Image (cartoon, rainbow, N blue to C red):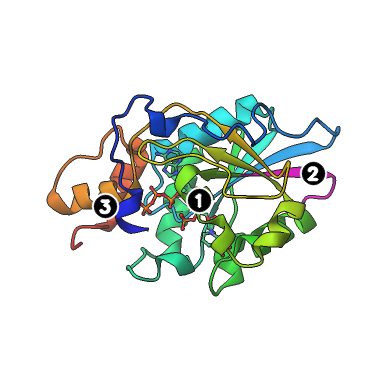
Amino acid sequence: MGEQDMPTGPAHATADGTVQDPGARPGHGPARTGKRRLGVMGGTFDPVHHGHLVAASEVATQFQLDEVVFVPTGEPWQKSHRTVSPAEDRYLMTVIATAENPQFSVSRIDIDRGGPTYTVDTLRDLRALNPDTDLFFITGADALGQILTWRDSEELFSLAHFIGVTRPGHHLADPGLPEGGVSLVEVPALAISSTDCRARVAKGDPIWYMVPDGVVRYIDKRELYRGE
Ligand SMILES: Nc1ncnc2c1ncn2[C@@H]1O[C@H](COP(=O)(O)OP(=O)(O)OP(=O)(O)O)[C@@H](O)[C@H]1O
Ligand SMILES: O=C(O)c1ccc[n+]([C@@H]2O[C@H](COP(=O)([O-])O)[C@@H](O)[C@H]2O)c1
């Protein structure tokens, strides 16, 4: 998403990184229904980094999720201004990054559907594949702020509960979603972005400890981001 995604604040908690909208429901979202609770972490993951992993892990704990499925985008239409790495590379990096966590999985649904990726399709498909399951869509403060520009945004909140998480350099607030449709959650602050990871690789700077070791090695093996 360009410059507004770049962290501008320090890595520790800042005024930008706290839950600031008293109108949105804090805490742990809707009461348990007895159904399985599936977190959905959508992203372009170009590459997946520890900011994504920490956010998913923290929300899984706070919301007592049974599983978090990472869903790499097929064609992220709001990133059409830049070249996005091949979906298979982004998918494989996400598999490598999540493989050791028994609570994490990766879905190909957005990649295999083809065409531009719309979360409304992701959630419809996941609901069809997972009956008797409550869905919790996890999104960073930057993406949450854009959500009313997403396709069929009014339908999204009937398909899943949305969880907006803090991200350094971004203000976390309810952008005016239906009442009870979103929870705002503070997660450990990691000032990491995929944009910064790509830029560092292009410059020859290390990205060790910003992304999982296996992802560093995969980027090297496939020579990703070198020409950017
Ligand atoms: N460091 C972070 N902390 C919290 N949430 C994050 C962080 N990085 C990304 N996210 C969230 O993860 C989701 C997927 O993000 P995405 O794959 O676009 O990564 P990104 O780092 O924002 O990428 P890019 O810099 O290429 O735009 C989004 O909801 C985004 O807000
Ligand atoms: O549904 C939409 O129109 C839409 C528009 C932009 C982004 N999204 C979703 O938001 C998530 C994060 O997207 P991104 O581009 O920041 O990686 C990912 O799951 C995308 O499919 C969805």
Q: Name the residue nearer the viewer: 136 or 48.
A: 136
Label 2 sits on what residue type?
A: Thr
* Percent of width and height locating residue 166: 47, 35
| Disc 2 element | strand
Q: Is residue 163 above or below residue 113?
A: above
Magenta range: 130-137
Q: Residue furthest bottom?
A: 115
Q: Can residue 125 be seen in the rendering of this structure?
A: no
Q: Which residue is mark 3?
A: 198
Ligand 1: does it lie within 8 Å of the C-beta at label 3?
A: yes
Image quadrant in which you'd find residue 132:
top right
| Disc 1 element | helix
* Percent of width and height locating residue 4: 34, 52
Q: Is residue 29 above or below residue 221?
A: above
* Mark 3–mark 1 distance (CA, rounded to whole Å): 24 Å
Residue that appears at 25% across and 50% down: 220
Q: Which residue is mark 2?
A: 133
Q: Earlier in the sequence, mark 3 or mark 1?
A: 1
